[in-house]
Amino acid sequence: MTQKQRIDAFVALGKLLASDQEKINNVLQQAAFKNPWYTPANTKKQFQVWSSNLTAEKLTPWIASYPFGESDKVVGLILAGNIPLVGFHDILCVLLAGFHAQIKLSSDDAGLTKFVLDELITIEPAFEKKIQLVERLQQYDLIIATGSDNSSRYFDYYFGKKPHIIRKNRNAIAILTGRESKGQLKALGADIFDYFGLGCRSVSKLYIPQGYDFHLFFEAMEDYNAVKEHHKYVNNYDYNKSIYLINGDRHFDNGFMLLKEDIRFTSPLATVFFEEYEQLDPVRAQLEAQADKIQCIVTEATIETGIPTFPLGGSQCPALTDYADGVDVLKFLSEKK
C-alpha cells in the first residue's frame, strides 16, 4: 500500500464521518446507550473534528516530513475512553506510517473505534492486515499507552523495556485577565463543557486577577446549562456541592457548575478550580514548573511558557500537529521504523 493509498483512504473516511447517513446516526445512538457520557452531540462533535482534519490538504504535508514506507513492526496501542475516539490520533499516526496496529480498546469505547476501523477497511481492504483489536497485547515492537497517573506505573513496569510513549493525567488551564468580552468567555465555555469536561484538553483550572468579578463569566456560561439535564453530570455536581458546603470551602455556584478556590490543577467533574493572581510572571513560572501536568493553556493574554497555547475556545479542536503531551508520535515512529 502506497502512502497515497493510505491518505486517500483516510480522506474518504473523513467524508463519511461528516455525512448524515443513517448508519452514522445509528452509531451515535448506540454509543450513547452503551456509554451515557458519549451523547450523540458529543460523538458527532468528535466526528466533525476528525472530518475537518482528514483531508488531503492537511494529511499530505503533515506526513511528508517523514520518510515512511511499509513496516513489519507492530505498535501496541492502549487507548483511553474518557471521550469519544480519544485514541484515534495514535491509530492515524501508526497506520499512515505503515506500521501494524495492535489495539487494546478501553471498556468505555462503546464500539466507536471498531466502527470507524471497519469503515476504513471497507474503504481500503489492505488495512485489514494492518489492524488487530485484542484483549491483551502480545508480540509487539513499540508501545503507545494512554492512562492515568496510577496506570502509568503499571505501563512502565510491563512495557518500559520496549520503545514507548506512556501518557499520564493532564488538564487544560485558562488564564483570564478580566478584560475578556462575553463572546470570548462564551468560547471558554466550550473548553470547559465540551465532553462534560472529561478530556485532557478540558479546562479544569482558572487563573483570575485579584478582585475578579464573576458576573460576566457566569452570564456567558448560561449557554451551557443543558449539561444539568444529564443525570451523570448532575449527580457529580450535587455531590461536590454538598462536600463544599459541609466543609465550608470558598466556592461559587451557578446551578450547574462550581468554581472552587484551589491550587491544584485537576478538579472533580462539574467543578473548575480557580486561583487569584496579582501579576502574570509568577503564574508563568508556576505553569512552567508543572508543565508535565498541563496539556495546554487557553488565554487571550500574552504569556510565553513553552506549553501549547490557544485562544479561548480553542482547546478542544486540536490540529494534527497538536500531539498529546507534546510528544511527536510521527517522529517517535520514524526513529523506530
Image: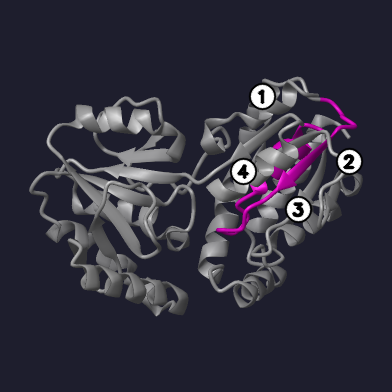
The mark closer to the camera, 3 or 1, is 3
The residue sitting at 48% across, 48% down in the picture is 200
The residue sitting at 87% across, 43% down in the picture is 130
Query: Is residue 331 among the parts visible in the rendering?
Result: yes
Given the image, on which type of amino acid does mark 3 rest? Lys
Given the image, on which type of amino acid does mark 1 rest? Lys
- Residue wearing tag 3: 104
Given the image, on which type of amino acid does mark 2 rest? Gln
> What is the CA distance from the residue labelled 3 to the residue labelled 1?
22 Å
Q: Is residue 138 shown above or below 230?
A: above
Residue nearer the viewer, 268 or 185? 268
Number of labels in the image equals: 4
Q: What secondary structure is found at the residue carrying circle 2? A: loop
Left or right position of 122 against 196? right
Image spot of residue 80 (x, y percent): 62, 53
- Residue wearing tag 2: 139
Q: What secondary structure is found at the residue carrying circle 1? A: helix
> What is the CA distance from the residue labelled 2 to the residue labelled 1?
22 Å
Badge 3: how crowded within 10 Å, few (<14), some, or many (20+)? some
What segment is highlighted magenta in the picture? 69-98
- Residue wearing tag 1: 331
Q: Is residue 52 shown above or below 219?
A: above
Q: What secondary structure is found at the residue carrying circle 3? A: strand
Q: Earlier in the sequence, mark 2 or mark 3?
A: 3
Image spot of residue 283 (x, y percent): 24, 33
> What is the CA distance from the residue labelled 2 to the residue labelled 3?
13 Å
Q: What secondary structure is found at the residue carrying circle 4? A: helix
Q: Earlier in the sequence, mark 2 or mark 1?
A: 2
The mark closer to the camera, 2 or 3, is 2
Image spot of residue 88 (x, y percent): 66, 48
